[in-house]
Amino acid sequence: TSGGAQSINILVRLTNTASEAIDSLTISYDLEQYRTGKKAYKTTLYTSPSGTNGSWGAADDAFALEFTNTTAAATGAADEALPISVQKVEGQVLHMAIEAGQSLYLAWHTAASDGTEAGGAPCIALDNVSITAHYKPVTPTDCHAATATPVVTKRLINGQLYIMRDERMYNTLGTIVK
């Protein structure tokens, strides 16, 4: 359609189903370009705790990518199954707390870099998305006193976080498991 700037959004809702709060996410993804456009396009990652209007904010610039290779007329690759350009965001940390049972919404927003109408847009795809959750440090409340400095390690077993201390295993509530 004509008459204003146009954009494309790809959205995902992430829900923390664990019993611990998530402290941050490590995010990686590829943006693949399958056709050049008449103007430059930028993809920015936005976050929202609710997904509602007015709740969205742009993530750090480390998550933004721009395709600036343009031609007078939009053209595709010789082999349309292969992208003509790939840009990557690799291992970037998004510091965003997600409490147990709560959600976080992510939106990859692609629009003309100059904010104008989208005519002659490139064909851009999101691929190879990887999102890893990192949990807030947990200290067991049922640890016995020790005279020496205890060695504390964390283990993730079948998706559940356990804390090992003095040859005992605790769950994240501090209860002795083993």
Image (spheres, rainbow, N blue to C red):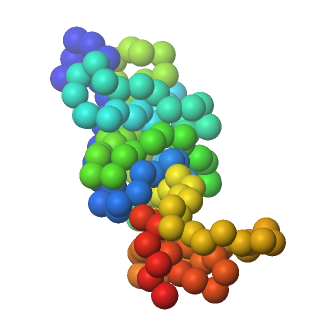
Residue toward you, 99 or 114:
99
Which residue is most to the left? 1
Residue 17 visible in the shown view? yes
Residue 169's place in the image compared with 136, above or below, is below
Q: State the image quarter where residue 116 is shown.
A: top left
Where is 58 relative to 9, above or below? above
Residue 102 horizontal/vertical position (percent) = 29, 46
Question: Who's the residue at 72% across and 72% down the image?
Answer: 146
Residue 139 vs residue 56, the one in the foreground: 139
Pick out the residue farthest to the top: 3
Seen from the viewer's position, the closer of residues 76 and 153 is: 153
111 above or below 136?
above
Residue name at image x 66 percent, y 69 percent: 145
Q: Nearer the viewer, residue 35 or 78?
A: 35
Q: Position of residue 88 (x, y in %)?
A: 59, 51
* Residue at 54 percent of width and 35 percent of height: 64
Please state if 142 lies on the left or on the right of 119 as rendered.
right
Residue at (45, 51) in percent of width and height: 22
Hey, which residue is sitting farthest right in the picture? 148
Whether residue 27 can be seen here: no
The total number of labels drawn is 0
Measured as percent of width and height from the top left, residue 37 is found at 45, 34
x and y, in percent, of residue 137 in the image: 57, 55
Relative vertical location of residue 133 with respect to residue 63 in this rendering, above or below: below
Q: Quadrant of residue 160?
A: bottom left
Q: Which quadrant, please, contains the N terminus? A: top left
